[in-house]
Amino acid sequence: MLRAMLAGFVSRRLRVALTASAVALGVALMAGAYVLTDTINASFASIFATTNSGIAAVVSPRSVLGGDNGPQLSPITGQVLARVRRVPGVAEAAGAIFGTATLTGPSGRSLTTFGPGLVASALPAPFNATVMVKGHRPEAPGQADLDQMSFERDGLHLGDVIRAAGAGTARAYRLVGTYRLRTSGSFGGTAVAILTLPEAQAVVGEPGRYDEVDVAASTGVSPQALSERLAAALPSDLTVRTGRQQAASESANAANQLGFLRTFLLVFAYVALFVGAFIILNTFSITVAQRSRELGLVRAMGASRAQVLASMVGESLLVGLVGSATGLGLGLLAAPALDQLFKSLGADLPDNGTVLQARTVVVSLLAGVGITLLAGLAPSLRATRVPPVAALREGAPLEPTRWARCSLPACLAALAGGAALVGWGLAGRGGAGAVGGGALALLIGVALLSPRFVPPLAYALGTTVAWRGVTGKMARENARRQPGRTAVTASALMVGLALVTFVSIVASSTQATVNQVLDDDLAGNMVVEPSSSGGGPGLPAALAPALGRVPGVATVAAVTFSEAKVAGLRGTQTVTGIDGAALARLYRVKWVVGTASVMAHLGGGAAIVTRSFASAHHLVAGQRLSLLTPSGRHLVAVVRGVVSDQAGLLDDITLSRGVVEGQFSQPTDAVDFVGYARGATASSVKLAVDRLLASRFPQAQAWTAAEFKRHQADQVGSLLALIYVLLALAVVVSLFGLVNTLVLSIYERSRELGVLRAVGASRRQVRQLVRYEPVVTSLIGAATGLAVGALFGVVMVLSVGGSTAVLSVPLPTLGAMAVVAAAAGVAAAALPARRASRLDILAAVASE
Amino acid sequence: MGTFTSSWPVASGSTTGQSTPIAAARGARKTYGSGEAAVVALEDIDLDIWPGRFTAIMGPSGSGKSTLMHLLAGLDRPTGGRVFLDGVDLTTLDDRRLTRLRREKVGFIFQSFNLLPVLDARDNVLLPLSIAHRRPDPAWFGQLVAAMGIADRLSHRPAQLSGGQQQRVAVARALLGRPAVVFADEPTGNLDSKASAQVLGLLRQAVDELGQTVVMVTHDAHAASFADRLVLLSDGHIVHDGAAGSPEEILNLLKEAC
């Protein structure tokens, strides 16, 4: 039995290869995601191991709210440092600064960097992990060193003046040296300027304070023991780690920040595997139908059902193994390609050699083999029900499976369950998992239902090719012939297109909503944002007054974000700090409880909450909220208003900015809104603001309303581009399915094709016939995919965005997708059509 | 069941006159494989098929009768010698020309009917003309399907028709284009005796009333007795060529030959 199976396996090389490809692509993306992120994590781990190598223990701030990050203003003062030095066993201790800042070169442009630019204080010998390449260390206030990589990348020279802008206005420094890390070259591509300690403190806005204290132990004192002593001697808003723990913690932090990337890629890997499952199911089903004679023969010769099952499962196992192993190999090759893809979209990832963990191998193989076995199970069971008499009958149709009988209730159940799950998830209860699971169930439900609507749909869509005469008509009828087969093939394409449609509708609607908000709520005003997106320095508090002095500016409203723990509620809540009086003039929200005057007169003890937050926690006006801030202060705020804010500027709880700055230790702002004076034009004010920012605040960037819209559109656009590229993989997988189904169908219909040739059909006509069928199939997949995706997208936009959401359906994009799908059908048919037209007529029609 | 009437135009094959064969083999050979493993299927066959006649080709399994038919019909190429159809040397044609020739000059009837399951009876009958982008003569089509007794079955798919009905659809398909020759490969092999008699009667009528040329491969002596002429093959050689006669005479001939 095993030998028969293996022989069959070898003889069906093409089929096995096509089927295995369906698994391989998904596995490749999965393995690639792991390899890529592991590789990046490994390079960060080596960097952090280096920077912490000379350190026995590290004292750093701890967030009382339990997050990884402490308050923005460090509680470590000179007194804390003095206390550390007094702890027995401390040989040496140094306060250090390591904070974000926008670094600009002599041209005024930002230095190239991966992640936000950094400034660090020069450290004394035992803690210093750098070695000089050129020049000397900064000795005077106006001097700076820069890492050698950034120095070379931006073509700088010693003596050039760079500027560092953190929590305040930009400060200028003359480059006096370059350095590199002792073991690896750079900080993973991040530009890091090293300044004298007081200068570094000034740049990050913490004069007299330190981000951490590095400690060296006296001989005979272990890092562990030293850490324990330090922890006992210091207040609870500080945390103490050994150097090794600190490196691990910093690596974990970096890995965490990279976690989104892994999740993002894995989602697409699962999508590709899900699509692959359809193809495996289809191929095995067709194979079983075509081999009913052979299966009947082995049953007639005495093989048991268990043996038939074992041989079928064995075949899926082999296909799964071949596919997964190929995928793993491709993944190893793909990781650098993914790396390039992300680099081309603006990221610059450090690369210190590819890392292949055992986990990657195990998970990839398990996922690939598992999905193959699962998808192959139903056809395998079906194979066991082939009766021995099938050996004697030619083309004996298999009796319908039990599945076919219960499929209507099953698919309705899947649809209802999926809809319920999605609804539950969108209502905020089940989270993303519920939405994803529900969407999966819905897709499966549609796939199960599709054999019922494929015949009429095929008829309707088939008219697009039926005008081509009898070949077109036959293609249409072929697509209708085995609705189940066509349905599953089309479903594979449906999944990919549904997701693309969904994403493009949600993205386009989000953008339309943002535009609407900008028009409605921020009509004609200017937005000033941090110039480095993601993790860079915020806007200095000094910026808002400076903007206010620019001619033509009437109002400036600074907005800042933080978080707080509310007594009686789980987790942390997001907090927005606003200049109420200014913002009320520039920004409009819908008031559920209260009026705009609540915002205009927002005082120290008052809070505005959002409608969703209020309804989730049954808050009413007049209610007192007990808040715990990240710096450990307690305060009470009374709910004065409830709003619905379609732009999402106002978080769960909105307080006065003065409160957030002081009590939350949040000295910088997130965004400044600028309102023009009467008679001032946007372009002239923009020019003046740009001059101000360039000369004093390079960490900030100004956008007029029109520019801001374009900027948002660009950001959405580049994210969409990435998503499309990754979803294209799912479409490619479904193309393998199209090819596979077609190859198998042609094999099944060789006699018919032979007859056509015998009665005078030319090779070209046979090619046409074969080519049109997948066009019909892919149009079915496109139509269902567009419909399902549009439904998901509309539901998502309306339920998440609420009544204020703007629904935008990008018709040109969707139309292009349908065309691409049809073209994909033609492309998929190229090889099978060639094979079909080369068919030996005699072999096909000659009597048995 | 209707009958043909002699008022219809005769098939194109018979217009070439009685003196010229409509199909012919000259020294045609067919071998499969090469070297020691070579199998000779046909050896130096000379055969003329005369227009307006019903020729039966018989022979035991492996005698080469099907191969001979495939060569004459342009479905296969001889290893040596020449094959002519309506005056054209088939061995000189490329696939495209050969396909066009088949489309215009040849009709086929197969043992397993070989109707296309996705097309209804009407579309199956019209298939060769559709492929050739030729417009059918509606009157001729109506008379033909009436004669075949399938006029009320035209919207049925093959799966909804009996074997006899399917084969009559196939006969209509073969005759509709008025081909020079209709080749029938064991046309009654999958039919019961009643349906066989109907199909054979229709072929006979096509020859008698339309002057249609029919070449039929069969191993059924009863079927062969409907023909005018019997060609008997054995081991790749023609061992008998003469009038068909009664089933008993044919059976005797077969016994002698093998």
Image (cartoon, rainbow, N blue to C red):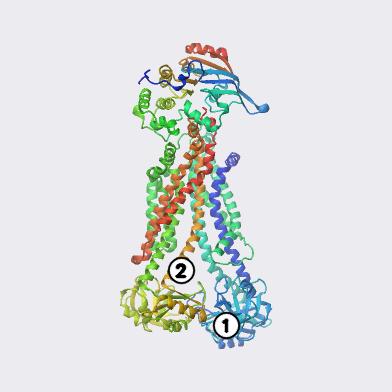
| Numbered disc total | 2
The chain identifier of the residue carrying mark 2 reads A
Q: Is residue B246 above or below residue A132?
A: above
Label 2 neighbour load within 10 Å: few <14, some 14-19, many 20+: few
Identified by mark 1, the residue type is: Ala
What mark, if any, has residue A711 been given in the picture?
2
Residue highlighted by disc 1: A172
Q: Earlier in the sequence, mark 1 or mark 2?
A: 1
Query: At 44% across and 70% down in the image, what residue appears?
Result: A707
Label 1 neighbour load within 10 Å: few <14, some 14-19, many 20+: some
Occupied quadrant, residue A623: bottom left
The chain identifier of the residue carrying mark 1 reads A
Q: Closest to the observer: A471 or A258? A: A471
Q: Closest to the observer: A296 or A722? A: A722
Q: Is residue A344 above or below residue B30?
A: below
Q: Position of residue A769 (x, y in %)?
A: 47, 39
Query: At 57% across and 82% down in the image, what residue appears?
Result: A172
Q: Closest to the observer: A617 or B102? A: B102
Q: Position of residue A526 (x, y in %)?
A: 42, 75
Q: Is residue A209 above or below residue A133?
A: below
Per the image, label 1 sits on a secondary structure element best described as strand
Occupied quadrant, residue A500: bottom left
Identified by mark 2, the residue type is: His
Q: Is residue A356 visible?
A: yes
Q: Position of residue B62 (x, y in %)?
A: 57, 22
Q: What is the spatial separation of the Cα atoms under label 1 and label 2, in whole angstroms?
A: 29 Å
Per the image, label 2 sits on a secondary structure element best described as helix
Q: Position of residue A179 (x, y in %)?
A: 66, 76
Image quarter where the N terminus of chain A lies is top right
